[in-house]
Amino acid sequence: MYCLQWLLPVLLIPKPLNPALWFSHSMFMGFYLLSFLLERKPCTICAMVFLAALFLICYSCWGNCFLYHCSDSPLPELAHDPGVVGT
């Protein structure tokens, strides 16, 4: 379970408030995970535990899934503020 110490913090990184940055964030996280899996080659148990946790977070639409935005969950209040997009 040593390799999980590098994978589990990825689930805790919040999505940006600006919806325009969600694609860049998901691409960065996807490439990070891909490069981690190719370079470190975690054990099968650690990879399965991480993928199960990622699936459960994304399936439940709990709000921290970096792969996509759930249609049922509301956008943050600051997402509609034009001042946030300009910064």
Image: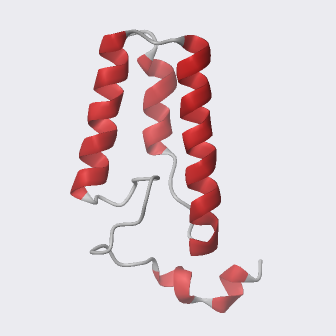
Nearer to me, 79 or 40: 40
Color scheme of the displayed model: secondary structure
Quarter of the image with the N terminus in it: top left
- The residue furthest right is 87
How many marks do you count on the picture?
Answer: 0
Above/below status of 68 relative to 73: above
Relative image position of residue 2 (x, y in whole percent): 44, 9
Please report the residue visible at 57 percent of the width from the left and 13 percent of the height from the top: 40
Relative image position of residue 67 (x, y in whole percent): 45, 53
Quarter of the image with the C terminus in it: bottom right
Please report the residue visible at 29 percent of the width from the left and 58 percent of the height from the top: 62
Q: Quadrant of residue 53?
A: top left
Q: Is residue 35 left or right of residue 72?
A: right
Above/below status of 27 relative to 83: above
Please report the residue visible at 60 percent of the width from the left and 89 percent of the height from the top: 81
Nearer to me, 3 or 36: 36
Nearer to me, 3 or 35: 35
Q: Is residue 18 visible?
A: no
Q: Is residue 73 left or right of residue 31?
A: left
Q: Is residue 40 visible?
A: yes
Above/below status of 55 relative to 33: below
Please report the residue visible at 50 percent of the width from the left and 54 percent of the height from the top: 14
Relative image position of residue 73 (x, y in whole percent): 31, 73
